[in-house]
């Protein structure tokens, strides 16, 4: 099960903008917060990408059952960065206490305010 997820096909075109994910509690999800611009990537060569911009994540909480520690995973295109990503009061904990959660970012630009857990120190401003 997924939480707040945006996925685009590798080499896709167009735009995804002005989307909000607000006031949600996720229980035992695999991908609490995910942008995947490399969905179903068959090759490493990127020729085009969907432009993702003005996305708001606010008051999202819950637990994750992920096998990898990335609770917040922002995998944006190397050709077209994700811009205008806004995060406010985001808090995820592992379903099993043995995992320390983290955030990962590829070419993601935005701002945070309020409590963000795991921290989004990888986000470009």
Image (cartoon, rainbow, N blue to C red):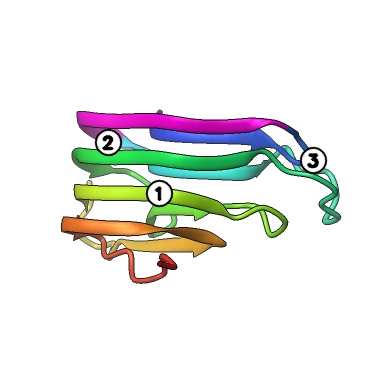
Residue at screen point 38% across, 60% down? 69
Identify the image quadrant of residue 8. Answer: top right
Q: Secondary structure at mark 3?
A: loop
Read off the residue under disc 3.
11
* Position of residue 29 in the picture relative to residue 39 (left or right): left
Disc 3 and disc 1 in contact, CB within 8 angstroms:
no
Residue at 33% x, 43% y is: 65
Expressed as whole percent of the image width and height from the top left, the position of residue 42 reads 83, 43
Q: Position of residue 58 (x, y in %)?
A: 22, 40
Q: Residue at x 40, y 39 (%)?
A: 55
- Is residue 87 shown left or right of residue 85? left
Vertical relation: 71 (above or below) 100? above
Q: Which residue is mark 2?
A: 28
Q: Earlier in the sequence, mark 2 or mark 3?
A: 3
- Vertical comparison of 91 with 103: above or below: above
* Residue behind mark 1: 85
Q: Dividing the image into 4 quarters, which one contains the C terminus?
A: bottom left
Callout 3: 10 Å neighbours few (<14), some, many (20+)?
Answer: many
Q: Name the main secondary structure of what is drawn in magenta.
A: strand
Q: CA distance from mark 3 to mark 1?
A: 21 Å
Q: Nearer the viewer, mark 1 or mark 2?
A: 1
Is residue 26 shown left or right of residue 68? left
**Residue 31 in view in this figure:** no
The nearer-to-camera label among 3 and 1 is 1
Q: Residues within 10 Å of mark 1 (few under 14, many from 20)?
A: many
């Amino acid at each position: 099960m997924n939480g707040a997820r945006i996925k685009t096909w590798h080499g896709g075109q167009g735009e995804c903008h002005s989307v909000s994910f607000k006031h949600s509690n996720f229980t035992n999800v695999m991908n609490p917060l995910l942008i995947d611009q490399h969905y179903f990537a068959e090759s490493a060569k990127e020729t085009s990408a969907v432009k993702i911009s003005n996305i708001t994540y606010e008051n999202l909480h819950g637990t994750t059952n992920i096998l990898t520690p990335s609770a917040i995973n922002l995998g944006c295109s190397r050709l077209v960065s994700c811009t205008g990503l806004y995060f406010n009061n985001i808090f995820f904990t592992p379903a099993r206490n043995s995992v320390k959660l983290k955030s990962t970012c590829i070419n993601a630009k935005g701002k945070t305010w309020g409590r963000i857990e795991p921290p989004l120190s990888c986000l470009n401003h």
